[in-house]
Amino acid sequence: MQGPTCAFVFSEAYTRYKFSEDHPFNPKRLDMTLDLIRTLDLLDPQQIVTPRPATEEELRRVHDSRYLEAVKRASAENADPDAFGAWGLGTEDTPIFPGMHEATSLIAGGTLVAADLVMAGRFRHAMNIAGGLHHAHKASASGFCVYNDIAVAIAHVKETYGARVAYIDTDAHHGDGVQWMFYEDPDVLTISFHETGKYLYPGTGEITERGEGRGYGYSLNVPLEAFTEDDSWMEAVQAVLEPALRAFQPDLIVHQNGCDAHRYDPLTHLAATSSIYRDMPRLTRRLAEEICDGRIVMVGGGGYDIWRVVPRAWTMLWAELCGRDLPPEVPATWLDKWQPESPFDLPALFLDPPNLFEPIPRRPEIEEKNQITVNRALNGTPFLAL
Amino acid sequence: MLVEQIMFQDVITVSPDTTLQEALEIARRHRIRHIPVVQDGALIGLLSDRDLRDCSPSTLEAPADNPMATTPVRQVMICEVHTAHPLDFVEDAAALIYRHRIGCLPVVSQGRLVGIVTERDVLHTLVEMMGVNAPTTRVEVEVPDKPGMLADIADLLRARRVNTSAVMVFPSSKDGYKTLVFRIRTMDPRRFIQDIQGLGYRVVGLPTPDGEV
């Protein structure tokens, strides 16, 4: 193939998907990440692809048309926030803001464009860092997500290319929106690794959620214990992805890379370090090369320590996707630029040093419980001939 | 919520003269475990999959004359059937199913069979009532067992514009206290938790590296 193999779908307008100044879903993380990627000289102008907004027809493949109308009305300058409760909008989580429909359509279009580039063979891999809005439901906003860019892209490649898609979700929160939209669809395998719903939104993602009807078995959930650390997390991810993807043989892999499983994340209770954000995309890429000619779309997702975690995690994601090596140190120019704004000391290394955090007292029990969860998840998956 | 809102209305039934073999085929075809036996619209008995299995010949035996083909349902059916009324509360139906360890309740009104609720329907409804299938965060608060506590916490939710899916009140393991469980529609409960603690209440059931507090 001539030219670059990886596309970076990006628009300055992505940062218009912003709820309010003190909302945890803060688009500054995109600016910081892009700046880090550029400082490291990892982005060639030829790799940058400008997204277009998803059309209403494309959105309607997965969203209710009445919901689209509600989002459009809620996007007006003088919309009344109390009028949209039934659609999950106008709440503290997902407040309404002028231009919301346009901002979220552009993100959905970005993931769709990324999937198109890969399926049409123009690029081997593509990434839409602003995508990953996995909580959006058919007719309701939820968990900071208005339109489900991932589902829009999957529905698009199904219809346009007849593709079968494997969806991997390694955000700390269950990938509920994508799961429910394809719950009865045997051509879309959804696999979500997340912190158990006992203490965390959205509360779903039990092992027993396996799909319905013809889609039975094509939803896989691996709910991991609070305070799960790197080794146990990676062991679970590898133990499930390898057999599941090999058995399913997708045409395309879409991976949601929320980076809120890190110990620093303020919203979740997992205890990973930054190394999983190098190891997971490495694994996905290896499996994609083996199984589907390398066809991967990477999207972002959650990640609420925008200072110490997100820029490093998503820079490693992009570097892994492009097969580029990173120096061990985060560049000093980048640190100097962002440190004055940051309420925390920014980490100087991409990989967190060992013993950065206190060991978890119940580690052996947590690891054992996670292994049992993995076995139970795999054993009940009918298409896996184990 | 009332039984009539969750009951299944197109009930598959048999007559007392249906043969056991036919009943078995009906149960298999519709994947049902309970068949009400009806005569002139009135419920006169119930046939369970266990009754049918007890009557079935062993798969190890050579197929000879199968008495199931000639025996009518009336010889095997249970005649004293626990039933529900369409206006019963779902909670009461659940209690009946639990107390008698049964799998379903035919719903009878004015002498006619009008529906059926199964263990599964009741459980599903209770799960919905608890708000478990909606995307929520669960927050547990320990409060003194006295009036006004629920309102105190609910005021905080109103101030934060957080929608609630379900609220449950449980006895606490601590004397003189009870536990309020909120399922709230937010991904970020941090400020709500701070507000509760600010009022001097204890948020419980939070994970820590050593286990739950």
Image (cartoon, coloured by chain):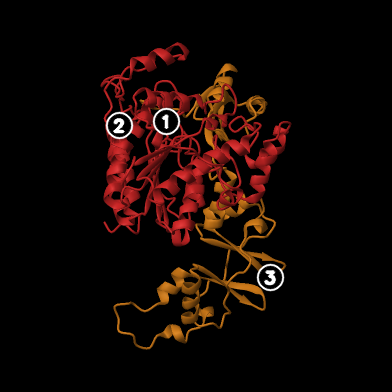
Chain colours: A red, B orange
Q: Amino acid at mark 2?
A: Asp
For disc 1, the marked residue is A260
Q: Are marks 1 and 2 in contact (CB under 8 Å)?
A: no
Do discs 1 and 3 share a chain? no
Image coordinates of residue B35 in percent, x first then y, are: 54, 71
Drawn side of residue B24 relative to residue A39, left or right: right
Task: Give the chain of mark 1.
Answer: A
Q: Residue at x 47, y 25 (%)?
A: A31
Image coordinates of residue A23 in percent, x first then y, are: 56, 25
Secondary structure of residue under mark 2? helix
Q: Amino acid at mark 1?
A: Asp
Closer to the chain start, of discs 1 and 2, is 2
For disc 2, the marked residue is A230
For disc 3, the marked residue is B112
Q: CA distance from mark 3 to mark 2?
A: 62 Å
Nearer to us of marks 1 and 3 is: 1
Image coordinates of residue B53 in percent, x first then y, are: 41, 72
Q: Please indicate, yes or no, whether residue B196 appears anywhere in the rendered image.
A: yes
Q: Amino acid at mark 3?
A: Arg
In this view, the residue farthest toward the front is A2
Secondary structure of residue under mark 3? strand
- Quadrant occupied by the C terminus of chain B: top left
Q: Are marks 1 and 3 in contact (CB under 8 Å)?
A: no
Which residue occupies the foreground of this view, A64 or A330?
A330
Q: Residue A206, located in which quarter of the rendered image?
A: top left
In this view, the residue farthest toward the bottom is B65
Do discs 1 and 2 share a chain? yes
Task: Give the chain of mark 3.
Answer: B
> Crowding near pointer 2: few (<14 within 10 Å), some, many (20+)?
many
In this view, the residue farthest toward the top is A340
Q: CA distance from mark 1 to mark 3?
A: 57 Å
Secondary structure of residue under mark 1? loop
